[in-house]
């Protein structure tokens, strides 16, 4: 994997980007590039059973909190440096990004071509770049700001990393 991996925010020529694209996890998943802002996505290249580990998360580098980083502890973030950076958010996620075990795990049965999405607040306490959610899930939280802004009841619907559960427990104990 490359030492650095740049995610382009706005793609103006998806065909040219696709032509130059070299997957970081061939045969497991790939990026589908789309023109515009934040329109690309990550899809499965094969079927995965619920609970199956899709891949290990390797080749990461520590870094500051950014819109492309993933929180791995109360005060630590990493850059994924791979196609995993194209996993979009969903309030009805298809995978978990488990930063405790550094794995991506299917949370539903997936078939080839399915989108790989995760619930961003499962690892993010306070988003660097909050955004309105367009996922359309029945239980959509509407505004993705991080776990800090969601109730324990809402967060209980999702996989959560240990640092997020610890932060939720601390927050709720302080307000009790």
Image (cartoon, grey):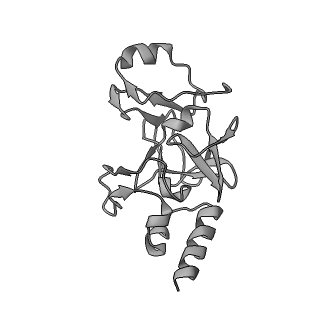
Is residue 170 among what the camera can see?
Answer: yes
Residue drawn at the location 30% of the way across and 61% of the way down: 138
Q: x and y percent of residue 36 in the render?
A: 32, 28
Residue 108 appears in the figure: no
Q: Residue at x 47, y 29 (%)?
A: 31
Q: Residue 150: percent from the left, percent from the top? A: 44, 67
Instruction: Point out residue 163 in the picture as x, y percentages from the top left corner.
Output: 64, 62
Residue 140 relative to residue 21: left or right = left
Q: Nearer the viewer, residue 175 or 88?
A: 175
Left or right: where 37 falls relative to 63: left
The tally of labels here is: 0
Taking the view exactly as shown, the residue that stands out farthest to the bottom is 176
**Residue 60 found in image quarter:** top right
Residue 100 against residue 7 in the figure, above or below: below
Across and down, in percent, residue 53 comes to: 63, 47
Of residue 106 and residue 124, the one placed in the foreground of this image is 124
Q: Residue at x 57, y 33 (%)?
A: 28
Give the residue at x 54% y 53%: 50
The image quadrant where one finds the N terminus is top right
């Amino acid at each position: 994997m490359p030492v650095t991996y740049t995610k382009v925010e706005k793609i103006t020529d998806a065909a040219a980007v696709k032509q130059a694209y070299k997957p970081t996890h061939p045969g497991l998943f790939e990026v589908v590039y789309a023109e515009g802002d934040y329109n690309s996505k990550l899809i499965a290249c094969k079927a995965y059973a619920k609970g199956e580990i899709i891949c290990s998360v390797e080749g990461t580098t520590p870094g500051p909190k950014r819109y492309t980083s993933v929180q791995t502890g109360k005060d630590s973030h990493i850059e994924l440096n791979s196609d995993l950076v194209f996993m979009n958010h969903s309030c009805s996620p298809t995978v978990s990004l488990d930063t405790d075990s550094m794995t991506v795990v299917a949370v539903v049965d997936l078939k080839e071509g399915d989108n790989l999405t995760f619930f961003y607040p499962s690892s993010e306490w306070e988003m660097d770049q909050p955004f309105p959610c367009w996922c359309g899930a029945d239980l959509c939280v509407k505004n993705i700001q991080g776990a800090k802004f969601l109730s324990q009841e809402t967060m209980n619907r999702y996989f959560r990393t240990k640092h997020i559960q610890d932060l939720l427990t601390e927050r709720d104990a302080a307000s009790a």
